[in-house]
Image (tube, rainbow, N blue to C red):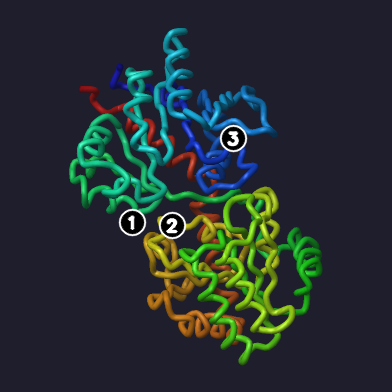
């Protein structure tokens, strides 16, 4: 492959995205990876030829071309084999991709590479997929040698690869995610006011100070810690309420034992102090951030870097987060958010929430800084440019 690129060649790349086998694109059922793919697609497809591979869905055709982007959807059962077959068909028809971007499934790379060996490969890591329980040392090294670049969603995720596989150091690059800045309106903007009023009325919190949680209802996300914190918050700020947006799993509103525990904790706080919205379709999430006055990410696990941070800042909410995994990489303490080190302490959350509710000027300053932060470098147009640079770098690597 030619190693010298003219400007035209750099801006005419044939790219394939291979999504995980979990959820479809567009993100009808949610999913951070699916939202990211859908967000960068209109920007990348302006200058490049893009194909997206993902699972089939009853609400989507198996094959379609939308705005010049080809979507190929295959059954979840035998997903990797099905994708390999599709790549082999393209290869047989002399249709090649310059870059194949495999999302979060390093173990599958070698199969895809055998189907289209001339392509350059990029693997992106959105979780700790190079841990010992996820991939063997032998498979990890083979995969790292097979790819041209490794994208990590945060510096933290990058270190989880290189600490075990030093071989990867020259290939790993953090590429931060982002949001559609047109969809996320700050709560103080005129465009947001009517929608904010409607949604706050819908959930019965129009006259309250709303603490917002958005995420899966699981122990790793820590909503139980937040509910315990609300006991103290309500003593100081009886006019506050907690709105919990999310469900057990993407588009699954079933209530498990943990969900029951959350509802019991909520009942102890009194009537209308905690509102559970259940699953909210991804298309409605940007509007739902407008319900809040401040946002809390109570993650207890080593979070790769939750995209809710970008979303909350985009909506103009002051952010409280935990110093876990990559979360704190985009939060500058007391500038565009508050970072809690004592992440398992409900008292620490109560203090941070009460501080923002008691100091409106400081809360507004943090909110404005957050919005400016995402506007400056975390729109999907910025993410697409970072990906484009990564693909060009992958194509420039010497092929051995």
Return the residue found at the far front.
257
Residue at 47 percent across and 28 percent down: it is: 78
- Measured in 3D between alpha carbons, the distance from the residue under mark 2 to the one under mark 3, in whole angstroms, is 23 Å
Q: Position of residue 248 (x, y in %)?
A: 58, 58
Residue 321 located left or right of residue 146: right
Q: What label does residue 156 carry, if any?
A: 1
Residue 359 can be seen, yes or no: yes
Residue 336 can be seen, yes or no: no
Q: Position of residue 1 (x, y in %)?
A: 30, 17
Q: Are marks 1 and 3 in contact (CB under 8 Å)?
A: no
Q: What label does residue 65 carry, if any?
A: none
Q: Are marks 1 and 2 in contact (CB under 8 Å)?
A: yes
Q: Which residue is mark 3?
A: 42
**Eyeballing the image, is 229 above or below 144?**
below
Q: Nearer the viewer, residue 341 or 300?
A: 300
Residue 15 located left or right of residue 361: left
- Measured in 3D between alpha carbons, the distance from the residue under mark 1 to the one under mark 2, in whole angstroms, is 8 Å
Disc 3 secondary structure class: helix
Residue 157 located left or right of residue 359: left
Q: Position of residue 182 (x, y in %)?
A: 65, 49
Q: What label does residue 305 carry, if any?
A: 2
């Amino acid at each position: 492959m030619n190693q010298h690129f003219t400007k035209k060649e750099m801006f005419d790349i044939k790219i394939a995205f291979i999504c995980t086998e979990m959820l479809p694109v567009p993100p009808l059922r949610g999913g951070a990876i699916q939202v990211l793919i859908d967000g960068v697609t209109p920007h990348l497809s302006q200058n490049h030829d893009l194909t997206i591979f993902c699972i089939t869905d009853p609400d989507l055709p198996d094959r379609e071309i939308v705005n010049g982007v080809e979507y190929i959807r295959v059954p979840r059962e035998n997903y990797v084999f099905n994708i390999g077959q599709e790549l082999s068909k393209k290869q047989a028809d002399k249709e090649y991709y310059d870059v194949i971007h495999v999302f979060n499934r390093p173990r599958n790379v070698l199969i895809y590479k055998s189907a289209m060996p001339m392509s350059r490969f990029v693997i992106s890591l959105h979780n700790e997929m190079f841990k010992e329980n996820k991939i063997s040392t032998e498979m990890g090294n083979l995969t790292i040698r097979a790819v041209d670049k490794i994208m990590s969603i945060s510096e933290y995720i990058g270190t989880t690869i290189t600490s075990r596989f030093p071989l990867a150091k020259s290939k790993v690059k953090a590429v931060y995610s982002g949001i559609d800045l047109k969809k996320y309106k700050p709560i103080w903007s005129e465009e947001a006011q009517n929608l904010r009023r409607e949604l706050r009325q819908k959930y019965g919190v129009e006259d309250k100070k709303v603490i917002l949680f958005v995420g899966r209802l699981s122990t790793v996300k820590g909503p139980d810690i937040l509910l315990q914190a609300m006991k103290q918050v309500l003593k100081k700020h009886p006019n506050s309420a907690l709105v919990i947006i999310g469900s057990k799993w993407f588009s699954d509103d079933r209530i498990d034992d943990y969900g029951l525990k959350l509802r019991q904790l909520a009942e102890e706080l009194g009537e209308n102090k905690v509102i559970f919205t259940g699953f909210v379709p991804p298309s409605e999430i940007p509007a739902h951030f407008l319900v809040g006055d401040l946002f809390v990410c109570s993650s207890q696990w080593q979070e790769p870097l939750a995209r809710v941070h970008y979303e909350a800042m985009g909506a103009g909410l002051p952010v409280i987060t935990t110093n876990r995994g990559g979360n704190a990489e985009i939060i500058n303490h007391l500038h565009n958010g508050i970072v809690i080190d004592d992440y398992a302490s409900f008292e620490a959350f109560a203090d941070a929430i009460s501080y923002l509710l008691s100091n409106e000027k400081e809360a507004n300053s943090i909110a404005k800084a957050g919005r400016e932060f995402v506007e400056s470098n975390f729109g999907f147009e910025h993410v697409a440019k970072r990906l484009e640079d990564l693909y060009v770098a992958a194509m420039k690597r010497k092929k051995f």
